[in-house]
Image (cartoon, rainbow, N blue to C red):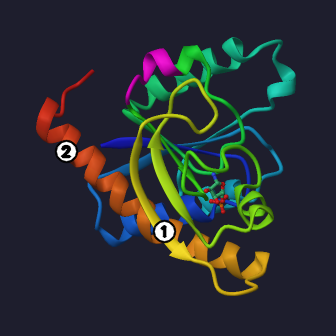
Amino acid sequence: TKIAVFASGTGSNFESIANEIKAGTMDCEISMLVCDNPEAKVIAKATTFEIPTFVFNPKGYTNKELYETEIVEVLEQAEVEWIVLAGYMRLIGPTLLTEYNGRILNIHPSLLPAFPGKDAIGQALDAGVKVSGVTIHYVDEGMDTGEIIAQESLVLEDGEDRESLQERIQQMEHRLYPIVLQEVVQSFVNKEGKDIQ
Ligand code: GRF
């Protein structure tokens, strides 16, 4: 199954998925990295894995529909079937949602529906929660609102600081995302047959 990973920043989740694929534990290949930030560290990671990139600057377009139309063209050219958001800091618009309906996943560093949006880890710490975690969900038009696929929780240590919580959540993400992605894609293939296009 051909997937595209969308990322805006560091790309540690991109890297963990690419590593699992390389190790042969998934029936996926990353056919494209889509990145909306020409400065992002994730671009060099894609180059290391010899994964093609589509890098764009949203400021160069008058609206979302225009750049998403271009993304759809690039993805169709590469026969991409699934979109995997990994730190992509933008809402997905109707153009992509229509084309990839039910085949877009996201990972978020909180137990949704708690703490959607930016800096979920900071939000959780400010709220003083004792438990937090990671959510993987389908993407809809809202901000971190789509149907939940999987969650894993962790108990905060007394007085745990941001650095420590962030580190533990990231480790959880890196382990969980490849596993859940493989399960979702595999069960889709089993249900629908592979030739969905
Ligand atoms: C992750 O914490 C993910 O949950 C959130 O953005 C972060 C991306 O980190 N959506 P990275 O770029 O994969 O290192």
Q: Residue type at mark 2?
A: Ser
Q: Are the residues flagged by discs 2 and 1 in contact, CB closer than 8 Å?
A: no
Q: How busy is the neighbourhood of tag 1: few (under 14 within 10 Å), some, or many (20 plus)?
A: some
Residue 54, horizontal then vertical, whole percent: 64, 37
Element type where label 1 sits in the image: strand
The residue lying at 44 percent from left, 18 percent from top is 99
* Label 1 beta carbon less than 8 Å to ligand 1: no
Look at the image and tell me whether residue 63 can be seen: yes
Q: Is residue 28 above or below residue 147?
A: below
Residue 85, horizontal then vertical, whole percent: 55, 44
The residue that mark 1 highlights is 153
Residue 149, horizontal then vertical, whole percent: 37, 47
Element type where label 2 sits in the image: helix
Position of residue 109 in the picture relative to residue 106 (left or right):
right
The residue that mark 2 highlights is 187
Q: Which residues are magenta?
A: 97-102
Q: Is residue 169 above or below residue 103?
A: below
Dot placed on the residue nearer the N-terminal end, 2 or 1:
1
The residue lying at 30 percent from left, 55 percent from top is 182
Q: How many marks?
A: 2
Q: Looking at the rendering, which quadrant does residue 52 occupy?
A: top right
User: Which corner quadrant of the figure contains ligand 1?
Assistant: bottom right
Q: Nearer the viewer, residue 151 or 75?
A: 151
Alpha-carbon distance for marks 2 and 1? 24 Å
* Label 2 beta carbon less than 8 Å to ligand 1: no
Name the quadrant of the N terminus.
top left
Q: Nearer the viewer, residue 147 or 104?
A: 147
Q: Nearer the viewer, residue 140 or 42?
A: 140
The residue lying at 68 percent from left, 57 percent from top is 42
Q: Residue type at mark 1?
A: Ser
